[in-house]
Amino acid sequence: MKIFLKLFAVIIFISTILSSCTDSTTYADELNDEKLLIADYIKRHKLQVVTTFPKDNEWTKEVNNEVLDVYYLSKTGLYFHLTNKGDFGAKKDSVETNDLVIPRYIKYTLDQNADTTYNWTTLDEPFTSNFNFNDLTQACQGWHEAVSYMKWNNSEAKIIVKSKLDFGVDVRPATPYCYDMKIKFQK
């Protein structure tokens, strides 16, 4: 009888360990959940998504007496919304290849109880990157693409970055983030 109880306890213990080690969630499931989370975020915040890059003053749209933010969905899957054009005008104020770009940002999650996961001011510890329009391997691909749309010193944008376009640390599980960004650059 003691042998039977010991054997039963060992079987239960091994079953518990094996069941806790197996996760049936696949990467495809995670990508689908990520897509649903982004869609829910868009719906909750009443965002207007377009696939043609908006002209200068078309970053908001009035529908039924309600002003909606317009987000451009790029071919890579980046959601981009320009909130401030920046120092528009002189050629010297537009970002060019090999300019030193200094972003300031707030990073937060998309869930209903959004969490500011990272608030980084470049005054404390600057992050700099030489911007190159042709090098998509730099830091965060979503940021790189956003900077190419922002173009002007002191411009500001809101972006939604899917896991495959982010820094790579949140690829598994697939986790999208929002960023409020402002850029400065040095020539």
Image (cartoon, grey):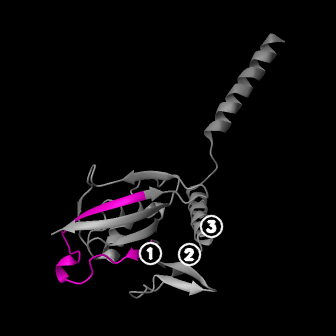
- In the picture as drawn, the residue positioned furthest to the right comes out as 1
* Residue type indicated by callout 1: His
* Residue type indicated by callout 3: Asp
* Helix, strand or loop status at disc 1: strand
Res. 163 mark? none
Q: Quadrant of the N terminus?
A: top right
* Residue type indicated by callout 2: Leu
- In the picture as drawn, the residue positioned furthest to the left comes out as 187
Q: Quadrant of residue 53?
A: bottom left
* Helix, strand or loop status at disc 2: loop
Which residue is located at x 48 percent, y 64 percent? 162
Asked whether disc 1 touches disc 2, contact meaning CB atoms under 8 Å apart, the reply is yes
Q: Quadrant of the C terminus?
A: bottom left
* Up-down relation of residue 185 to residue 89 (above or below): above
Q: Position of residue 9 (x, y in %)?
A: 75, 21
Q: Distance between the Cα atoms at labels 1 and 2?
A: 10 Å
Which residue is located at x 41 percent, y 55 percent? 168
Residue 112 visible in rendering: yes
Name the residue beneath numbered marker 3: 40
Q: Which residues are magenta?
A: 79-106
- In the picture as drawn, the residue positioned furthest to the top comes out as 2
Q: Is residue 102 magenta?
A: yes
* Up-down relation of residue 164 to residue 77 (above or below): above
Res. 47 mark? 2
Q: Earlier in the sequence, mark 3 or mark 1?
A: 3
Q: Distance between the Cα atoms at labels 3 and 1?
A: 17 Å
Q: Is residue 48 magenta?
A: no
Q: Position of residue 115 (x, y in %)?
A: 52, 52
Name the residue beneath numbered marker 1: 81
Q: Position of residue 19 (x, y in %)?
A: 67, 37
Q: Distance between the Cα atoms at labels 2 and 3?
A: 10 Å
